[in-house]
Amino acid sequence: MTSETSEIRPAVVFDNVSKAFGSKQILRDISFAVPAGRALCILGRSGTGKSVTLKLLMSLIKPDHGKIWVEGDEITRLNEAGLSKVRRKMGFLFQDAALFDSLTLYENLALPLHRLTTKSQDEIDATIDNVLSQVGLAGDKQKMPVSLSGGMRKRAGLARALVLEPRILLADEPSSGLDRITAAEIDELLIRQKTQHQTTVMVVTHDVHGARSVGDLFAVFDKGSLAAFGAAAEVEQSENETARRLISEY
Amino acid sequence: MIELIEFIGSVSRFGFRVIVDSLRRPFEGAQIMRQVAEVGYRSLPLVIASGFALGTVMTLHTRNTLVTFGASSMIPTVQALAFFLEIGPLVAGLLLAGRVGSGIGAVLANMRATEQIDGIESLSIDSFKFLVVPRVAACVVALPLLTLFMDFSGLLGGFLSEFFSSHIAFHLYISRAFSNMSWSNFIAPTLKTAVFGFIIGVVSSFFGYTTNEGAQGVGKAATRSVVFSSLLIILADVILIKLIFFAFPENAL
């Protein structure tokens, strides 16, 4: 961790993190820090470890080397109980939403509220109604995930990620498979979450246009390494050609 | 050979974790009830129909032989002993391995492939305890109950078959059926199916929960769940019968 990042007390820090699956090296000595309340968009070609980065942050997989901090907690050293507390601070929008297909939309959102909070049934109902109205699904709470369209599933996944009021929101390709208008709606929700609730947002995306509207910072991954990191203007001036090309493709 | 030992070790460790986690809070009562309904209630028609058909066919096969030896009065006894001691528990176990084992394997593998299991973990919920433990518990609870339905529907099938041949009265059939039965003939073989249920739950959950082959892994998990559950049930049956004979020597007829 650099002295600069420790001074600004970042929400997320990656310090020389490496990860391999079998003989394939996915991430190589990745280091960066995301200040609290800011949005980082991770860009890069397919298979460069962008989604793996989010899963490492959520401790769904473990790094081979390096350390990861979330709001001051070094998650690479925590046991399951400690990880559970850290995960409680984060919400994760998966690429395909990952809604539980045996539960209705309401039940998908109620599950974590019932298990992780002391809210009464009325409070839970009010929370769910509030979150669903934010994402424009207020009238769909009794629907099963299979009956939702792609855009609705993404918004439902976002609602589930937000229902516990996370301080850090992770989104894995939130606009993939969506038309431009629906993708813009999702981006708008992410921006609103950042500005109204000061949530730290980390987005993995191939949509550079959306990334530039959501992100304050940009990380470009190339062949498992961090090719460029910084504000859009800094990445545009990067020495790495892939980074320059990616950030300009909109 | 090393792969086989690794596999046995992994499944054993998985099964041990199920036992440990089932004793830890929260106890997932609602999830267990949901799974009992899925595993037990929805398997009931298959078990009853199979038991009835097996009972009917078995009486048709054994009747001629027993009549030839002048032992037609033994037909209900043979039917009851065969069903309560072996056919009911084993066939119920194998039926459940097919219907439920494949279902558990496929559902969990699909949840893994579609990141639903990661989704549960991301919500600070222990996915193993939430998904695996209730399914294994449901199999352990449901299989002995399903075995009872299998036993009695087999007896009913046998009675109807015999009734159309000899017009035997129902109370006489039942009286002869249980004349040589002791409680140990009934309780031990029925309870051994709880072990079959544990095998089905653990093996099929293992293949579903630990798969990492995406959508392709769903079919593989379902097939492997049925094949390995069935094989292990038959193997466990041999061992459990020996143990039952050791504990209840009067059962060794």
Image (spheres, rainbow, N blue to C red):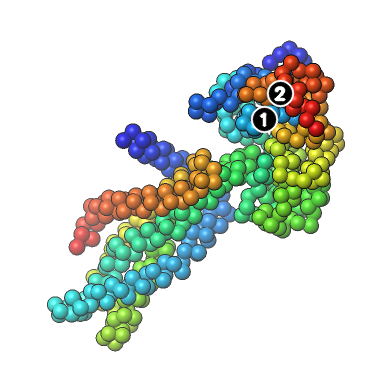
Residue at 27 percent across and 75 percent down: it is B59
Of the 4 image quadrants, the one containing the C terminus of chain B is: bottom left
Please state which amino acid type lies under the numbered disc 1.
Answer: Arg
Residue A34, can we see it?
no
> Quick check: B229 above or below A51?
below
> Quick check: A79 above or below B146?
above
Q: In this view of the protein, which residue sits in the foreground, B11 or B193?
A: B11
Locate residue B35, reporting x and y percent: 53, 56
Q: Are marks 1 and 2 in contact (CB under 8 Å)?
A: yes
Q: Secondary structure at mark 1?
A: loop
Question: According to the image, label 1 marks what residue?
Answer: A45
Residue at 66 percent across and 24 percent down: it is A222
Closer to the chain start, of discs 1 and 2, is 1
* The image quarter in which residue A94 lies: top right
Question: According to the image, label 2 marks what residue?
Answer: A242
User: Image check: A182 left or right of B11?
Assistant: right
Q: Residues within 10 Å of mark 1 (few under 14, many from 20)?
A: some
User: Image check: A238 left or right of B226?
Assistant: right
- The residue most toward the right is A196
Residue at 18 percent across and 80 percent down: it is B67
Locate residue A90, reporting x and y percent: 70, 35
**Protein chain holding label 1:** A
